[in-house]
Amino acid sequence: MGPNAAAAKQAEQLRINGNTYFKKDRFGAAIDAYTEAITLCPNVPIYWTNRALCHLKRNDWERVEEDSRKAIQLDSSSVKAHYMLGLALLQRQESAKGIKELEKALDLGRGANPKGYMVEEIWQELAKAKYHEWERSSSERTWELQSLKLACESALKEKHLLEFSQAEGFVDDPTTSHSEQLEALKVVFKIAAEADTPTEVPDYLCCRITLDIFHDPVITPSGLTYERAVILEHLQKVGKFDPITREPLDPSQLVPNLAIKEAVQAFLDKHGWAYKVD
């Protein structure tokens, strides 16, 4: 066995030791083991993500960011690295950058094998961040609309008073016209506020089992769309059949429903309130 192979074998054993310490919540010992593994083999991304996860458990966000960035340099498709980098950036109020990393993690995570499937976990954090972002911008828009509405009403009132003084002695009364204009103004501002007014998410954008908006929609040969995590759990624990049509179904037959995924994203982009999680 050459020196490189020996170092790799030793580093792998250190990773296994680190995992054992991690499971026992001995994060300091786990960090030491992963650090030794990194010293021996610095180009293995999982050593960096494992150590980043230990730092996350200790709320050491600066080190989470450092290790996650290093892991991404080594493997740009690392779901865990993008996810943890996103969380670290959110911690230091880098909202837009943090959301971007979580979105990247979500996209990569949708294609991950079931063992490393993290979509639900990522979605929860992304949805929280996006909902807070919507709350901030929605408050600003509401305030701006209210100010504009008051200014328009005030301008209409002045116009009405002017017309009323000029109309004295004539048969035509501008009061009716003024009321109609105020009513029209109210309708216009109601429509302008609609996107920020929470309603119900359309049924076709929701999983028929969870009743929640789709996070990772997949379509079956029968043409029905389910949340991937939910249908996989059904196939594993209940049986290999479609829960609604009862037709035989194998996990390999599930295909991402890209049309619904895009429709969900378009809806969320327009209606940020739909990101709210319980």
Image (cartoon, rainbow, N blue to C red):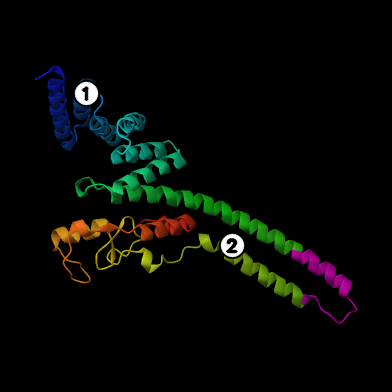
Q: Which residues are magenta?
A: 156-175
Report which quarter residue 203 is drawn in.
Answer: bottom left
Residue drawn at x 16%, y 37% as measured from the top left: 23
* Above/below status of 108 relative to 10: below
Q: In this rendering, which labeled residue sits more in front, label 2 or label 1?
A: 1
Count of residue discs? 2
User: Which percent across, then down, holds residue 30?
Assistant: 20, 29
- Three-letter residue code for mark 2: Ala
Decide whether the magenta segment is chiefly helix, strand or loop: helix
* In magenta stretch: residue 197: no
The single residue placed furthest to the top in the displayed view is: 3
Residue drawn at x 42%, y 44% as measured from the top left: 99
Residue ID for mark 2: 192
User: Which percent across, then down, holds residue 139?
Assistant: 54, 53
Front-most of 130 and 236? 236
Residue ID for mark 1: 41
- Residue 13 lies left or right of residue 275; in this view the side is left
User: Which percent across, then down, holds residue 186?
Assistant: 64, 68
Q: Quadrant of the N terminus?
A: top left
Report which quarter residue 46 is drawn in.
Answer: top left
